[in-house]
Amino acid sequence: MSLIFLNGRFVERDEARVSAFDAGLQHGVGLFETMRASLSGGEAVVHGLEAHMKRLEASARTLGLSDSLRVGALGDAVVAAVERAGIVRARVRLTVTGGDLNLLSRAREAAEGSGGGSASDSARSPAPPKQPTGQDPTVLIDVQSATAYPEEMFERGVGVAIADAKANPFNPFEGHKTLDYWWRLRALQEAAMKRTSEALVFTVTNHLAGGCVSNAFVVKDGVLLTPIARGEEDDVAAADTGRGAVLPSPVLPGVTRAEVVALAERAGLRVQRRMLSVSDVLGADEVFLTNSSWGVLPVVRVEAATIGDGQPGEATRMLRRTWLEGA
């Protein structure tokens, strides 16, 4: 059972069509957010909606998709879609693409908007380039029943592989939820062939970035460690003067990651954001992954190496239990 909202109206699944020239299809230009939602008395509760919308808006502006996304209206549309779907526990995906328009034409439009002008014009201070008007982005909301994961995954923990692909901290598109997910999905396919549930991604400098579809945490000697996410670099560098500058981060600032960090701090756990090596992962007391679908997922094996005593650890269990209470 699912419900589709496409460009301002609800449509049947087989009527949900976009142009063959949509920038998302032609060039992979687009962003998405995946959210959990539930119904209570017929009213929708979309968990972390504001945080998801803020992240979407910031990415759209930073990557040049749009500097004026109406995220308030998008959030309202998400809530309306969940209520109309009538699914008690739902998974919601909001996708925004560049729309049915050639992006090079938009770039030329922006350049022309900056004005070449006459000789007398050039003597004045140049006006900033105009944002290309173009066509509105394509907006797609898909509401489906939430994925039902086996409880055994959380009781016993899972194994994960190590992805061959590397994240590049100098790629400005890393750390955003863009439509470029092929390499991640391929790594997940390879992980499944190894009978593991996820794949850990490392950077070109061999530092942990996270899972293919998740953020990563390590527990060592009672301290909760997580890779530095995009947007946290300056704060980490300022707080850690002994280490100097921090590389740009390709790590997505996950909404569930932020929730878990807040839960850990309220529980009195010390939390550190820093660059983590393979040795940090393999030598950890506990490892777990987070995303909006499963919340907190214990990891007890990385490839052939056992993490800790091979069982979900105390901190992981506590954080999952606390997260579920708020879910």
Image (spheres, grey):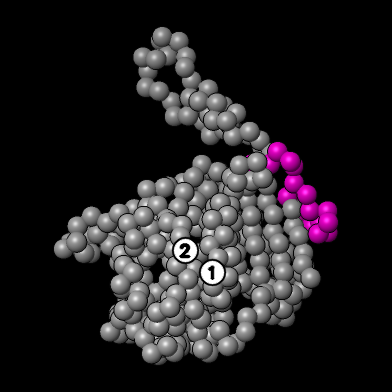
Q: Is residue 243 visible?
A: yes
Residue 214 in the image, given as x and y percentages of width and height: 50, 68
Q: Earlier in the sequence, mark 2 or mark 1?
A: 2
Residue 267 in the image, given as x and y percentages of width and height: 37, 85
Question: What secondary structure is marked by label 2?
Answer: strand
Which residue corresponds to the image point at 47% horizontal and 29% vertical from the top-left?
129
2 and 1 marks in contact (CB < 8 Å): yes
Mark 1 lies on residue: 191
Left or right: 19, with 247 as reference point: right
The Cα–Cα distance between marks 2 and 1, rounded to whole angstroms, is 8 Å
Which residue corresponds to the image point at 59% horizontal and 45% vertical from the top-left?
29
Which residue corresponds to the image point at 77% horizontal and 73% vertical from the top-left?
86
Q: Is residue 39 above or below residue 165?
A: below
Which residue corresponds to the image point at 36% horizontal and 55% vertical from the top-left?
204
- Quarter holding the C terminus is bottom right
- Asked whether 172 or 123 is in front, the reply is 172
The quarter of the picture where residue 274 lies is bottom left
**Amino acid bearing label 1:** Ala
- Asked whether 154 or 283 is in front, the reply is 283
Residue 193 in the image, given as x and y percentages of width and height: 58, 70
**Residue 13 covered by magenta stretch:** yes
The quarter of the picture where residue 194 lies is bottom right
Left or right: 171, with 59 as reference point: left
Q: Which residues are magenta?
A: 7-23
Q: Residues within 10 Å of mark 1 (few under 14, many from 20)?
A: many
Mark 2 lies on residue: 163
